[in-house]
Amino acid sequence: MTTITSALQAVNQRILAATAQSGRPSGSVQLLAVSKTFPAGSVREAFAAGQTAFGENYVQEALAKIAMLDDLAVEWHFIGPLQSNKTRTVAENFSWVHSIDRARIADRLSAARPAELPPLQVCIEVNISGESSKGGVPPEEAAELAAHIQKLPRLKLRGLMAIPAPTDDPARQSMQFRRLHELLDQLNSQNFQLDTLSMGMSGDLESAITEGATIVRVGSAIFGARNYTKESSG
Ligand SMILES: *Cc1c(COP(=O)(O)O)cnc(C)c1O
């Protein structure tokens, strides 16, 4: 077994265990393998081991991989910061976008989504920890953005995503995930029908699952440590 195959098995095992421990139905948590900075060959290996959904943060890097892997039925998720001038490329090449944080980006994605593809599945990114450096809408602005996105014909609003501030305090960590879940419940009580909580990464997926994550985004626990010097901002 390759390193990626066995690491993937271990992550799936962690997800199963956390799902069971939280008393949630098996299969209620989806694994998104975050392949940013890793080569197409690594994605191919994980795909061969049964993983089909992959997350990318950088448009140019993702495009190159998508082209090299077009023989595989990969479901591509865009999870990085999104600039206006990249919205067409993302609308044409991805199934999901987790990181919508303003109406203008949503408008452009909807306008550029090709008619022959299903609607783009999207999440609103919420700045759950209130860090000024982070992307995402403040929680109190999520409802307004959700109402805007719901009117766009080529987007399907699925839920919320967050990247909470890293912390060594397990109570604070759970609290941040819980807040995102509460915000989802609040929106659903206002007649939105959202089924997705995209939260939890390599180091904290158990806590995210306990708090209701439906998609965990896991990179380094599958592919190994990232070499940040290779990252591009595109
Ligand atoms: C890189 C990244 C991840 C994966 O992080 P790991 O700690 O490697 O699991 C998840 N979500 C987002 C938005 C990321 O940029």
Image (cartoon, rainbow, N blue to C red):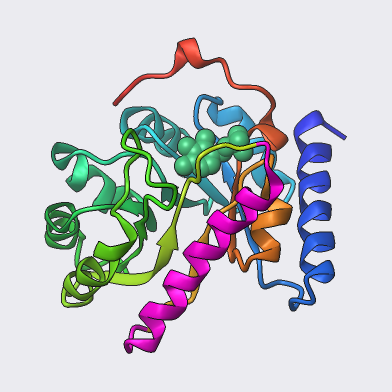
Q: Using the image as rendered, state which of residue 83 and residue 176 is in the foreground.
A: 176
**Does residue 43 show up magenta in the picture?**
no
Q: Using the image as rendered, state which of residue 92 and residue 167 is in the foreground.
A: 167
Instruction: Give the residue furthest to the top.
Output: 229
- How many numbered marks, from 0 up? 0
Residue 141 quadrant: bottom left
- The residue that appears at 77% across and 47% down in the rendered structure is 11
Residue 93 horizontal side relative to residue 30, left or right: left
Residue 36 visible at all: yes
Residue 207 horizontal side relative to residue 145, left or right: right
Residue 214 horizontal side relative to residue 93, left or right: right
Q: Locate ligand 1 by image quadrant.
A: top right
Quadrant of the drawing holding the N terminus = top right
The magenta span reads 168-192
- The residue that appears at 73% across and 54% down in the rendered structure is 206
Above or below, comparing residue 148 to residue 31 in the picture: below
**Could you say where residue 156 lies in the image, as x and y percent from the top left?**
31, 72
**Could you say where residue 70 lies in the image, as x and y percent from the top left?**
45, 43
Residue 4 quadrant: top right
**Could you say where residue 36 lies in the image, as x and y percent from the top left?**
50, 31
